[in-house]
Amino acid sequence: MPIPRCYNTLTRSLEAIQPRVGEGQKLSLYTCGPTVYAHAHIGNFRAYVFEDLLQRHLQERGFIVRRVMNLTDVDDKTIRGAHAAGIALSDYTRPFKEAFFQDSKELRLLPAEAYPAATDPEQIVRMISMIGTLMDRGHAYQAEDGSVYFRIASFPEYGKLAHVDLEGQRPGQRVASDEYDKEAVADFALWKAWVAEDGAVGWESPWGKGRPGWHIECSAMATGMLGEAIDIHCGGVDNIFPHHEAEIAQCECARHGQEPFVRYWMHCAHLMVEGSKMAKSAGNFFTLRDLLEKGWTGREVRYALLAVHYRGALNFTMEGLAAARTALARLDAWRERLAETAGSETATVAPDAATEGFFTALDDDLNISSALAVLFETLRESNRRMDEKKLTPPQARGLLQWLARVDGVLALEPDASAAVISAEVEELVDARAAAREAKEWKKSDAIRDQIAALGWTVKDTKDGQKILRS
RNA sequence: GCGUCGUUAGCCAAGCGGUUAGGCACAGCUCUGCAAAAGCUGCUAGACUGGUUCGACUCCAGUACGACGCUCCA
């Protein structure tokens, strides 16, 4: 079996993905999930779609993937949101969590094995325990403000993921003045001491009442669910520094063995909308539901997000969505035509060896463009042969079988619900067939308009009418 | 300022030191009462300036432009 390779942010090179010795075909995958203070936007989902493609392809290659995605449900933004709404934190975040799962389903994302939330009691316990270990080992200290900070000076490797040299960095313009009691500016909070603005949000700890810092949340949830040594960790490029850098520092200072926290770091590039950064003020800010309201489907959005290599910036445009729609319609028509050609044939003839190129392309750091090129070349070639009546039913069946494997990775097959025709439409189609029989073209056209108004497109073929979702 | 990465036909977007990537759009044809849909065919680019080479979109250097990170952010 060919070995998939990925670009590892840590080493800045392409590496073969190999399970750890003794782990068989098992790979653990930790993916940074949403902060549930609002609806996730399509930029967030670009990362999740990339991670989904990664998981599906690894599974196609025979790996057993254990994936965990966290939900950040306590941080500055969620607390601020709950406070502004005048409701409890959990009541504020719950609808956003639910919306996230709905959207994920709409985009056909495989569910993770677990979705730990930062406020889960067992996670809080683990965070506190981890901070305790860091304190015991001298990697953390409690400052005068009561908060506990990670002592970056105690971990010389800090910066290895982002390849930043702290000495050479220009600190941000706004060094918070209330952080004067930290030993070093770059030290980050592990435990934030309770302040009045936190309201009812807070947990007791050996360092007093407070709440976890964002970085320790992920470190605790990742190692708690998947163990101290994780195979693959994904996220958006903006997470590289400081979030993932901090995760490495925390985990590698609190671990019991010597194994690296994560062996393969994979990061997804940003998404732009119509050529510029997505921003509410620019009016180009989209959540999935915004797009669904405009009449786009989840799989069209999935295609648009999937079709561009994850390490390149993706310019999300309405034209791109339209291109996705057309390309999908073409795939659907091909799939249907193959099924007709295959008929009830069950014997298969393996497709041309070139079709395997679809998967080998994905082995190469998920080269989706090359993979899709194989798919469309196969489509055109077999259509040509069907035009010439040269594709045999077993060959068509073989292609359908290959396509099923491809769908296992791309998840772009048509919705089953899309094919359900209402009785009303059924009647109109029959009435139109009668009108056509009688060559009553005006009546036929009028019925066609009625059917169109119900959302279906009629095609007249030599085998009668065919209707498709429009 | 420092650090990454990028610049491919109307748009999106890959591989490759020499042989048609692919998708969308557009055009022609086939099918057809009309239409739509679909199919086939056509459409061959590589920011700029030098260099290396028998040969460069592909390697090297410089220039310009752009994106991203250094700060909560996928």
Image (tube, coloured by chain):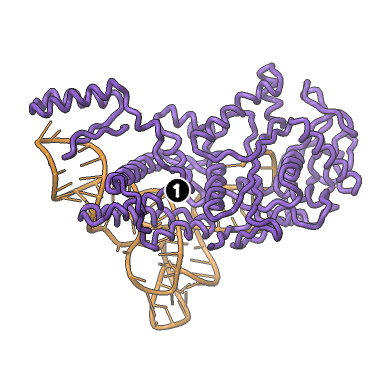
Instruction: Judge whether A370 appears above or below A51 on screen.
Output: below
* Residue pictured at 68% horizontal, 30% vertical: A77
The correct choice, above or below, for A119 with respect to A368 in the image is above
A124 and A85: which is toward the camera: A124
Determine the image quadrant of residue B55: bottom left
| Residue A20 seen by the camera | yes
Q: Which quadrant of the structure image shows residue A425?
A: top left
Q: Position of residue A331 (x, y in %)?
A: 35, 45
Task: Report the chain shown in orange.
Answer: B
Left or right, residue A122 beside residue A428: right
Which residue is the site of mark 1?
A: A307
Residue appearing at x 29%, y 55% in the figure: A382
The quarter in which the N terminus of chain A is drawn is bottom right
x, y (%) of residue B32?
12, 39
* Residue A416, picture quadrant: top left
Viewer-proximal residue among B60 and A380: A380
* Residue A152 visible, this orientation: no
Left or right: A18, with A299 as reference point: right
Amino acid at the residue labelled 1: Ala
Colour chain A is painted in:
purple
Dot 1: few (<14), some (14–19), or many (≥20) neighbours within 10 Å? some
Picture layout, residue A169 above or below residue A90: below
Callout 1: SS: loop
- Residue that appears at 29% across and 45% down: A343
Residue A150 % position (x, y) = 83, 45
The quadrant in which the C terminus of chain A is found is: top left
Asked whether A337 or A297 is in front, the reply is: A337
Give the residue displayed 72% in from the left and 42% down from the top: A225
List x then y, in percent, for residue A393.
29, 52
Say which chain tag 1 marks.
A
In the figure, is residue B40 to the left or right of A124?
A: left
